[in-house]
Image (cartoon, helix red, strand yellow):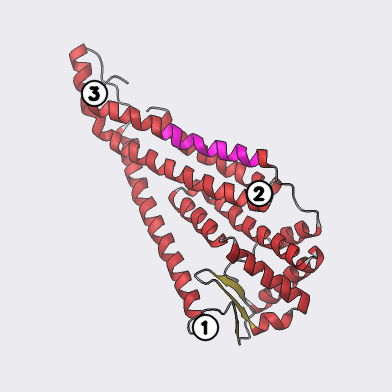
Amino acid sequence: MRFDVYSPLALSLLLAAAGPLTGRYVAPAAAARVLAAAAVVTAGATTWSLVLLGAALLGDVPPVVRAAGQGGAAADPVPVVIGLAACLALVVVGVRLHRAVRAERRTRRALRLLCAGQPADTELIVAASAVPRACAVPGRPGRILVTSAMLGALGPAERRALLAHERAHLAHRHDVLVTAATLAAAADPLLCPVRSTVVYLVERWADERAAAAVGDRRTTAHALARAALTAQRGGAVCALHFADRAVTRRIAALQAAPQPSLGSAALAVLALSTLPPLLAADATGDLFRLLTGAPL
């Protein structure tokens, strides 16, 4: 209990350091899935550790009684200050999660309103607007919303790349991965670098799928660069960041050969993500023994 309960917090730092490295050397599809899953598991274990630290304040009485009967000094597995800090941290976690969920719902509601009134089988929605914008709208069915300004700035091949990019977001449910990583970072701020890496990776993943659909990596890179410049001039922000997330790195990646999968590295990150729940489970057993007065 004295050490295991703090381990998920330390492992959060390790995952935060390993996340960007994984995104750099592992293929985007595998890295995005692995990091999103690892972030959720680690955030859950970290939150549970905070619960244990707060609940351990209730475990002071049995050790005191037991130590008094043995004539020894009472051992305090969790200092009161740390227990109170954990309770405060849990309140902060609750507030951050509430805000993250509310922001996610607000964004999805706004996107659905933009697509309201369209036939159910309509995939592409072109809005007459001088603001260059393109985004994937998750849902059933998923939609692609593009403004006339964005389409007008791209050539035919570049338009195909843009639409293929957005279709990849919808087909592979990238919104689920980003939302999972966002909620994990809200629960555990130490995982914010992992969340940023997942957001970047789903864009790289969609870039690669677009390049495969178009059959030309250079055309996809040109489409990305032109869309980025157009959106920058128009001050637009794309919902899934077709034109505003580490564009230079993404263009450079498209101009190079596709990354190898490196499944061993992905498995190593998954193995790392199993440690926080295992250690949290061990700390949970220690807490139950503490509360029942059993020897630790």
Cα–Cα gap, marks 1 and 2? 38 Å
- Rendering quarter of residue 51: top left
Q: Which mark is residue 293?
A: 3
Three-letter amino acid code at the position of disc 3: Gly
The CA span between labels 3 and 1 is 65 Å
Q: Amino acid at mark 1?
A: Pro
In primary-sequence order, the first of circles 1 and 2 is 2
* Dominant SS in magenta: helix
Q: Does the segment drawn in magenta span residue 267?
A: yes
Residue 203 percent location from the top left of the image: 65, 61
Where is mark 1, residue-wise? Answer: 119
Instruction: Find out whether the residues at labels 3 and 1 contact each other: C-beta distance under 8 Å.
Output: no
Q: Quadrant of residue 4?
A: top left
Rounded to the nearest angstrom, the CA distance separating label 3 from label 2 is: 47 Å
Q: Which mark is residue 23?
A: 2
Name the residue located 71 percent from the left edge and 65 percent from the top edge: 210
69 relative to 27, above or below: above
- In this orientation, does residue 228 appear? no
Q: Quadrant of the C terminus?
A: top left
